[in-house]
Amino acid sequence: MILSMTGYGKASAEYNNRKIHVEIKSLNSKALDFSTRIAPIYREKEMEIRKMVSNVLERGKIDLNVWVEKETESVGATINPDVVRNYVRQLRDISATTGIEVPSPAEIWQILVRLPELTQSNSVEELCDEEWEVVKDTINRAVEALMDFRRQEGEALAVKFNKNIDTIESLLASIEPFEQSRVQKIRKRLEERLAELKGVDYDKNRLEQELIFYIEKLDINEEKQRLTNHLNYFRETMASGHGQGKKLGFIAQEMGREINTTGSKSNQAEMQNIVVKMKDELEQIKEQVLNVM
């Protein structure tokens, strides 16, 4: 079954007062176009993350976002009491030597919060093996959610493609009655034109030969056979598994070539109308096949 390149997946996990979130999006692209936004603590694992995701998704414009939410209790910095006491002592010493009034406690705090080195970091963030396993599992779950999305989209595309193929087959079969009557119409038109040329004698055997040659040039049996083969091959390729998007695009191009040749040889309004309808169905296939992985 074919897969779509469009997809979306999201997963979350918790570890040591942290909420780990992973969001991944995918759009159609000719090759793998991978962009990431990763929380600083996990950035050292970026290459491994890229490899993990690329091995599964293979193709498309991928946007991966990994971020962390910390609970309010696990604040990364605290006030350094030694620095506070030192600043307060300096303020009082300055007041004593200069005669400036000592600020009130509320004013002192307003001054302190503007001074450097008031806070100190509780800990240095380091990625441990246990947390990395949690992150990997979260990424894998987000990727699997995206793949489920791709499968659903792929099934919808397959239904649409089969409908388009069936319609083209039906239109191709409807050409046959007009194709058979075309010979008689061409013969009648030529004979009427020759009858208008009064006093001109012509070799009827030569006319028959020229007519046969002309009709052979307009014969579309080969085009019909090749188009039928391409339609069947398109179905077989869809059923052969994912990763067939480019191949399906090539088959659609060949189908278009046969339909165009049929149209150029039609030489009849009814047949050309049918060809236009076949082209419309094929354009729908070409538009959607760009989204097949």
Image (cartoon, rainbow, N blue to C red):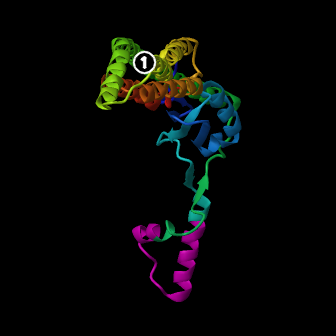
Query: Residue 267 appears at what percent x and percent y?
Result: 38, 27
Stretch of the chain drawn in magenta: 85-110
Residue 117 vs 4, above or below: the answer is below
Kindly report the secondary structure that dominates the magenta region of the rendered protein.
helix
Residue at 67%, 39% in the rendered image: 46
Instruction: Tell whether position 100 is magenta.
Output: yes
Which residue does the image show at 56% across and 34% down from the upper left? 60
Q: Is residue 42 above or below residue 274?
A: below
Judged from this view, the residue extending furthest toward the bottom is: 98
170 shown above or below 49: above
- Say which amino acid is labelled 1: Lys
Q: Residue 238: image x %, image y %?
A: 53, 15
- The one nearer the camera, 37 or 127, is 37
Percent across and percent down for residue 266 are 40, 25
Within 10 Å of disc 1 (Cα), the crowding (few <14, some 14-19, many 20+) is: few
Answer whether residue 15 is magenta in the image.
no
Q: Is residue 46 left or right of residue 105?
A: right
The quadrant of the rendering that contains the C terminus is top right
Q: Name the residue under label 1.
A: 204
- Above or below: residue 90 compared with residue 212: below
Depth order, front residue of 224/135: 224
